[in-house]
Amino acid sequence: MADQTVEEILEWHTRTWYGLPARIVVSSRNLHRVWADGLFLPHFGLVNWVTRQGLPTPVRLELTARHELGHLQTLPVPLLHLLSLGLIWRRGKGPRWWKILLALVAHQAIWELAAEGYVIATDPRAVRYPRPTWAHRLYRIFWGSMALLAAWATYLLSRVGATE
């Protein structure tokens, strides 16, 4: 039997605070399509799938679109972090593949935290909307695991750079 669920889609056209034009399309099937100044960035929303558990579809779609916009709005934060990782990288002689892996993990975790921080700062429903206890726990696990990944990978990258 075919899936009879109707896919809901939310589309936003906006600009970032620094003027970058953006088009954001999110769907109830968790496929995200983001255009930043014409650059197309399609992806499956794993973080949004985790952080929006227990929310009704309209709220989930709005918060998901806000999260995707948050990636663009907070772009300077992960770029500054990436620059600092580059400075740490230059200090050491560790294995290149290890440094690349640590830098990617730290960078992605920082960017997810920044984007979700933007959601919380601009829409209180991200933390205040009623949802099951297990969904609140999952949200806290997201925050804890992303913060731990960001700190751990950044620290390890600094240690690889300092010890070799």
Image (spheres, rainbow, N blue to C red):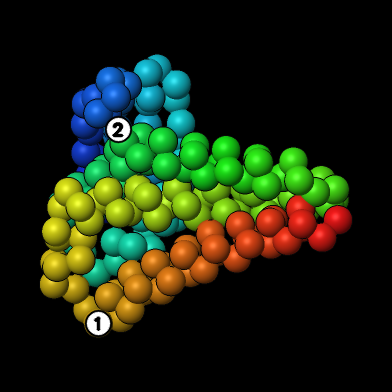
Q: Position of residue 9 (x, y in %)?
A: 24, 40
Query: SS of the residue at dot 2?
Result: strand
Query: SS of the residue at dot 1?
Result: helix
Indicate which disc residue 24 carries.
2
Given the current orientation, which residue lies at the most extreme bottom position? Answer: 133
Q: Quadrant of the N terminus?
A: bottom left
Of the image marks 1 and 2, the number of the one nearer the N terminus: 2
* Residue for point 72% across, 45% down: 89
- Asked whether residue 30 appears in the rendered view, the answer is no
Q: Position of residue 54 (x, y in %)?
A: 24, 69
Which residue does the numbered mark 1 point to in the structure image?
Answer: 133
Q: Is residue 93 left or right of residue 19?
A: right
* Residue for point 26% across, 43% down: 65
Amino acid type at circle 2 is Ile
Out of 19 and 46, give the one closest to the viewer. Answer: 19
Q: Residues within 10 Å of mark 2 (few under 14, many from 20)?
A: many
Q: Position of residue 4 (x, y in %)?
A: 28, 52
Distance in Å between CA atoms under marks 1 and 2: 30 Å
